[in-house]
Image: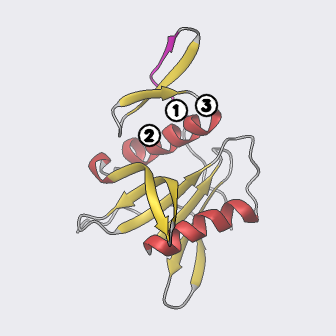
Amino acid sequence: MSSIFLPEYKPTTKTIDGRKYIYDIVRKRYFVLTPEEMVRQSFINYLVEHLGYPKSLISVEREVKMGRKSNRSDIHILTNSGDCFMLIECKSFKVKMNQDVFDQAAKYSSTLKAKYMVVTNGITTLCCSLDHEKKDVAFQDSLPEYPKS
């Protein structure tokens, strides 16, 4: 299992009343620049600008219903038919990638039947393919190409 390295990213930012904000190209507005938001925007940039994922099929901070409970996952990549192709869980670079982070993403991925799951803190990025029927997880050395059909 190896980590995927993200390319350098120079975000669009602005400062309002002493607080720094970062522009989200998917939601098309500025958000407070927290360490987690920086990781989220860096990863979105990687997907769109370097891997050619369609911006129109990326959903950010989308609700995931698990029974009566509702949570928000960081990034969903949808297929043209609306299925969840990939679920990405972003953490601050200060957060160590551990079993709790992996388990959180796995719950969301299982609920959404995502084909791929990614966890990242901007330093360590892990991707795995998921076979929900066989309950099989296989770590990948890179992110998959976006499906063309």
Point 36% across, 35% down: residue? 25
Point 74% across, 46% down: residue? 95
Residue topped by disc 1 = 9
Residue 87 coordinates in the image, percent (x, y): 48, 61
Report the disc number at residue 45.
Answer: 2
Helix, strand or loop at disc 1? Answer: loop
Question: Would residue 75 be visible to someone looking at this image?
Answer: yes
Helix, strand or loop at disc 3? Answer: loop
Distance between the alpha carbons at the discs numbered 1 and 3: 15 Å
Q: Is residue 136 above or below residue 80?
A: below
> Given the image, on which type of amino acid does mark 1 rest?
Tyr
Query: How many labels, in total?
Result: 3
Neighbours of disc 3 within 10 Å: few (<14), some (14-19), many (20+): few
- The boundaries of the magenta stretch are 8-16
Give the number of the mark in front: 3 or 2. Answer: 3
Circles 1, 2 touching at the beta carbon (< 8 Å): yes
Question: Would residue 140 be visible to someone looking at this image?
Answer: no
The reply, left or right, for residue 136 in relation to residue 83 is: right
> Given the image, on which type of amino acid does mark 3 rest?
Thr
Give the number of the mark in front: 1 or 3. Answer: 3
